[in-house]
Image: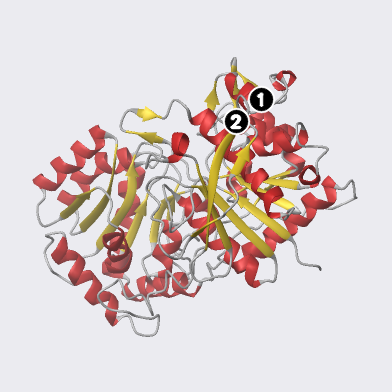
Amino acid sequence: MPPLKILFVSPEVDPFVKVGGLADMVGSLPKDLAAMGHDVRVVCPAYGSIKIDDSWRARDEPLGVDVGVGAHWGRTWETVLPGSNVPFYCIEHGQFFDRPEVYAGPWGDHPDNDLRFSFFCRGSLTLCQQLGWIPDVVHCHDWTTGFIPLMLNTVLRDTPIGQAATVFTIHNLEHQGYCDQRALDFAHIPVAEFRDDSTESHGKVNMMKAGLYHSTKITTVSPTYAEEIKTESGGFGLDHVLRFRAADLLGIVNGIDADGWNPAIDQTIPATYTAEDLSGKAVCKAELQKQLGLEINPDIPLFGVISRFATQKGLDLLAECLPKVLEGMKVQFAVLGSGDGELETLFRQAAARFPGKLGLHVGFNAKLAKLIQAGSDFFVMPSRAEPCGLTQLYAMRYGTPPIVRATGGLIDTVEQYIESTSEGTGFKFEDATALALANTIGWACATYYDHPQAYRQLQLHGMARDFSWGASAKSYIDAYQWAIATRRGEVSTAPAPSSSTAE
């Protein structure tokens, strides 16, 4: 198989700019693909929050992007993804990207997101032409890149880059990029594309919908989520589009950076450890208890939580059941997160009511997040919806069995604990209720106290799973080849879904 030329276009890329799991994927997968011999490049906006230092260089030639009246001019900065030789480009434009935020500020979504990301889409394709490097496939990520397949099918169809295939990955269907028709005019997209089977939705332009209709192939971040988004309850108004494109839709489970998330070599935690010697995990637990003001006791099961405070993440269920759990069980909780103001208030009240049992940090702290993964005995993730999820993968990697609701990628990555055989990697519950969550926490607590050997097996099973990008990277190569063959009018067969990184 000859090497492929693959362009990743993404609004966020770890470690340069991160809002969610999308950044983790785009910061990791290209490195694995490059290690397989492919020519992979990544492009992202140059937000004001990105620190440009001596490891970067600015390209001499300015970037003229054919949007709006005349053209908008930008500048391109270039470096590499850390730990690799993968070229990483940032497109600078003062009016659109000097601000530090990616999508929204304290006031809400940026009102010019339609123009910002239209410029970014066209600019990314223009950069390829400027470099004299035409990709075989453009890998687009979420609604901000939804105009790329549309542009390649319309205004750029008869250009050299118009021959490129597109793979459009849905990370979270809930966010769709609704905007006014001015976005089409600004991007020089034919007005005829404002129709139901292209960009129009409820009288607005829907950038996600544009990507879904015009991409060569579609992927999402777990097989179960790929099925859920084709239903009325999980499709956020686009289920009919995804049923229409079902033959071109593939679910591939996300992986993780196995070197960056490895308790055996992780220098950001108080002590390293392995599956053969977990003594360092006890050191991490004691430090976590100390930092969050919990009773320092190695024998009390400690439940970790790292999450956005939102109903989608099921944090309202946790807030509702916490008082009963903390009153009725000998347990501790370490909670890190922020988001909904009412939920933040509920967690602050619970922390004040149960000092020494509930440790809370409102906000985000990367080092504390690692410590919670390493120092907790269980990891709680009661999501109502979860396209894939990464924190449950990190938890298992660190010997911390997860407690998850059976939805999306959580179904695909966590294996249910079976008491009779001690098989499994965590605990799953079906109903999105506080009672179901409390009962499952109780089940985990009883396993910890009454069946220590079974608990130990849960830890070992999780730590033994391969959550690296290796298998998923191969699945993406299959998807790219499928898309390229389709774009070229060749007969091709859809690859099998990637059922789990845990196989």
| Residue nearer the viewer, 86 or 24 | 86
Task: Look at 30% across and 53% down and name the residue there.
Answer: 305
Q: Can residue 389 be seen in the rendering of this structure?
A: yes
Gap in angstroms between the C-alphas marked 2 and 1: 7 Å
Classed neighbour count for the residue bearing mark 1: other residues with Cα under 10 Å, few (<14), some (14–19), many (≥20)? many
Number of marks:
2
Residue 62 coordinates in the image, percent (x, y): 58, 46
- For marks 2 and 1, the one nearer the N-term is 1
Residue 394 coordinates in the image, percent (x, y): 42, 63
Which residue type carries mark 2? Met
Q: Is residue 306 left or right of residue 22?
A: left
Q: Which residue lies furthest to the bottom in this view?
A: 276
Which residue type carries mark 1? Thr
The residue beneath circle 2 is: 207
| Residue nearer the viewer, 382 or 451 | 382
Residue 95 position by quadrant? top left
Image quadrant occupied by the C terminus: bottom right
Q: From what the image shows, is residue 400 above or below residue 110?
A: below
Task: Look at 26% across and 52% down and name the residue there.
Answer: 336
Q: Is residue 219 left or right of residue 292?
A: right
Q: From what the image shows, is residue 269 above or below residue 114?
A: below
Residue 61 coordinates in the image, percent (x, y): 60, 50
Question: In the structure shown, which secondary structural element does the residue marked by tag 2 occupy?
Answer: helix
The residue beneath circle 1 is: 199
Q: Residue furthest top?
A: 203
Marks 2/1 in contact by CB < 8 Å: the verdict is yes
Classed neighbour count for the residue bearing mark 2: other residues with Cα under 10 Å, few (<14), some (14–19), many (≥20)? many
